[in-house]
Amino acid sequence: MSASHLRRWLATPSFRALLALAFVAVIGCVFNADGAFFHWSTHRDMLRQVSVYGILACGMTLVIISGGIDLSVGSVVGLCAVLFARQTLHQGQAAPGAIGLVLVAGTAIGLASGTLVARFRIQPFVATLAMMVFARGLAKWASGGQKISQAIQHPDGSFTYVDLPPIFHRLDHRVLWGNLSVVTLVFLACVLLCWLVLSKLRWGRYLYATGGNEEAARLSGVPIAGTKLLAYGLSGLFGAVGGICQAVQEQQGDPEAGSTYELTAIAIAVIGGNNLMGGRGGIGLTLLGALTIGYLEKILSVNAVGESSRLMLTGAIIVAAVLLQRRRAG
Amino acid sequence: MPARLLALRRIGKLFGPNRVLDGVSLDLDEGEVHILAGENGAGKSTLIKVLAGIHTDYEGAIELRGEPVRFASPQEANRAGISVIHQELSLIDSMSVMDNIHLGRELASRGGLWLDRRGQAGRALALCRQLDMGFSAADLARPVEQFPLSVKNLIEIAKALAFDARILVMDEPTSALNRAEVEKLFSLIGTLKRKGCAIIYITHKMDEIYRVADRITVLRDGRWVGTAAAADCPESRLIQWMIGRDLAPRAEAASRPAGAAATSVLVVRGFRVPHPVPGRPPAVSDFSVAVQAGEVVGIAGLQGSGGTELFHGLFGAYGAVCGGTVTIDGEPFRPESPARSIRRGLSYLTADRKGSGLVPAMSVAHNMTLASLSRASPGGVLRPGRERASAARQAAALNIRLASLDQAAGTLSGGNQQKVVLAKWLETQPRVLLLEEPTRGVDIGAKSEIYALMRQWTSAGMAILLISSELPELLLLCDRILALHRGAVTGEFSRGEATPERILAAAMGSPEGAGEACA
């Protein structure tokens, strides 16, 4: 590799995202909590814990590339966790039907946001902020304001307990000889799907063009409205996937689940180097961003850093990572 | 002998390993208009940025009234009396004229905390009167976005004067102005000269250079080529300095195979485009034209004559709102959406390359295939090999200078960006090209290349409708020229009849020009 090639590669967003990840990994090696950082189980648990955020960040990446933002995904997680728990635990619906229903509900929320943005030209921030509030309300309505768990309360005040359906065990399970959680595989599948859309399909190119210069794209015959609907629809779909994973991990449907998750998803996309202005970025960056955020949280928790310090440190490190990425060569 | 105001001595500048300026010197006298000329990428903007305190690490020295200075920031340069009026105006659209004029040096009263609104209004009004802008006190309180681009240009100049600028840098100040507004700007430049201001003026337009120039300095490839008094620097010498070679001989009269059965590719009858604001008179009220295969029909119109709206309407960019009939190759066509128009063989190069042409963050190759993507990706799946092959073919055919097809299109020079957008439209294999200001912001070399390409396309049977605000360009390229005034055709001229005076008269709505033309 010649010097100029090397220099060009050093200036790419992927390299900078790798650098941020390496930076966090070095911190992990230094503050290794008596060697805990060098056990695979720490990394496995980190992957499990970051998976729901990562799944949401996949959808967020598509929306951000198209030039928008989706604040509603945290509420979609709550709504879909509640729906999934209600269908499987209380209604006793079989897993495939319940999963299908929840995915349709999440996608519908995303398409509704997309319609507000594309058809009614409401600013994405405002449209999805409204949808965030609305979907949280839906979650509380669908759950009656209660966590939906194995304990079913009857009108006379008595409780009955239902067994967890097998789908819960199957999804919150480890595969590959106990080395990887199923939710992590789901996250990786979402990354793969986004990669296919963004780099192999015509619609992916439309996402970049719409975010890069909407008017130029429109005059080039790009279906702008359809492209935005796709981005928000997929974001809703990923929100639903995240909601199912959340319900499975908590073994219940909490109407408050997923609060502020949208912010973590945005942080992941940004720390990976996706530009909030739209038109550039990629899912690989988001994957690196998810690992960075995941390790950060994990390192702070294995070192028993208190929650208050943890939040402050996370904020500071996000800023540091973004500044690190912005520095240009020359 | 007028006093020397400014001297740049052997300025050099490196971007990483790339040398973009190499020992460039330039001096500026009081009351002088000094043209800075050169092709795109010659180093003009970099030199200006050094002067304006934007680039702070440079070689060489700057002397202001004999004193060495070194600006560490644009604010310092401003305080020293240097103001740059950029092509992209630095006004804040949502703020009032008055606030914009004082932006960054607000007048304060009562301990410096409160804005002295009355004082600001008084000073702004005085400035605007000085510039003969005809602004009332109420106009000053209106947000800048309510004014047309031409007025914004004047506001920008007023802002510079509010900073007591003695040295003004104008970068293509007329690119968005109509003829009357250009005249106004020139008379303002005269006023400024009499007040002892000095002006560095960057432009690509020949006629402007000889209208305003006292002296001319030419840069090429980051080096100083020459400085001469305007009177001693005829056009031919200037061009040779700029491009380092003689231009290809001016186009011979468009040589279309005469006698070949002329078939109309595009026929438009009674075309109407409604005004975007309901209740206003239509933007285009009555437009008819028939363009034959291999023909270039020009449309001459001043700013606001409806040319942009006409092309937007024909291309379906407004949706299905236009009236009249259109046929392409004899088949009726109803403009509904850009996608449909593209499928029917229509392509539209807009005047606003940044706003509606290029996707700067996307690669050159991806920009080129954007409008023909459904053909390049059967079944919705991209074919990178096929895409790269057609992009490489276009890059070669249009002689686009680039490092790689994967480089972001926004990193190319203006002329090459324009060629990328042209390549995008050629990839759709159009029958009819709607070209609006195809050489705006393009250097002289690329300009003549684009002219040659247009001839190549017409000889392949394409039909071209061309809007240009540069009359010489229309006269050079067009077989026929229509004059557009307030959305209606006010004159039609064959190649033999067309003279700048007659076209301009018709485009300005002069009745005798129109009468002459229709006769």
Image: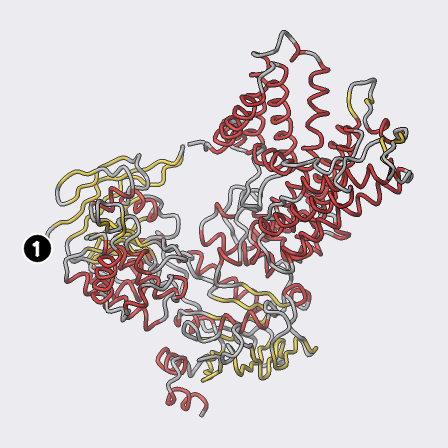
Q: How far from the left and from the top, in percent, is residue B145?
A: 41, 62
Q: Residues within 10 Å of mark 1 (few under 14, many from 20)?
A: few
Decide if residue A202 is in sight here.
no
Horizontally, is B267 left or right of A234 in the view? left
Q: Determine the residue located farthest toward the bottom in the rendered image.
A: B519
Q: How far from the left and from the top, in percent, is residue B146?
A: 40, 65
Q: Secondary structure at mark 1?
A: loop
Q: How far from the left and from the top, in percent, is residue B365?
A: 60, 48
Q: Nearer the viewer, residue B154 or A131?
A: A131
**Chain identifier of the residue bearing label 1 in the image:** B
Residue at image position (52%, 67%) is B435
Q: How far from the left and from the top, in percent, is residue B497?
A: 42, 83
Decide if residue B70 is in sight here.
yes
Q: Is residue B19 above or below residue B191?
A: above
Horizontally, is B205 left or right of B124 in the view? right
Q: Nearer the viewer, residue B283 or B254?
A: B283
- Circle 1 sits on which residue? B1
Q: Determine the residue located farthest toward the top in the rendered image.
A: A34
**To which quarter of the image does residue B247 belong?**
bottom left
The quarter of the image holding the C terminus of chain A is top left
Residue at image position (57%, 21%) is A24
Residue at image position (13%, 49%) is B4
What kind of residue is marked 1?
Met
Residue at image position (30%, 65%) is B208
Q: Nearer the viewer, residue B203 or A178?
A: A178
How many numbered callouts? 1
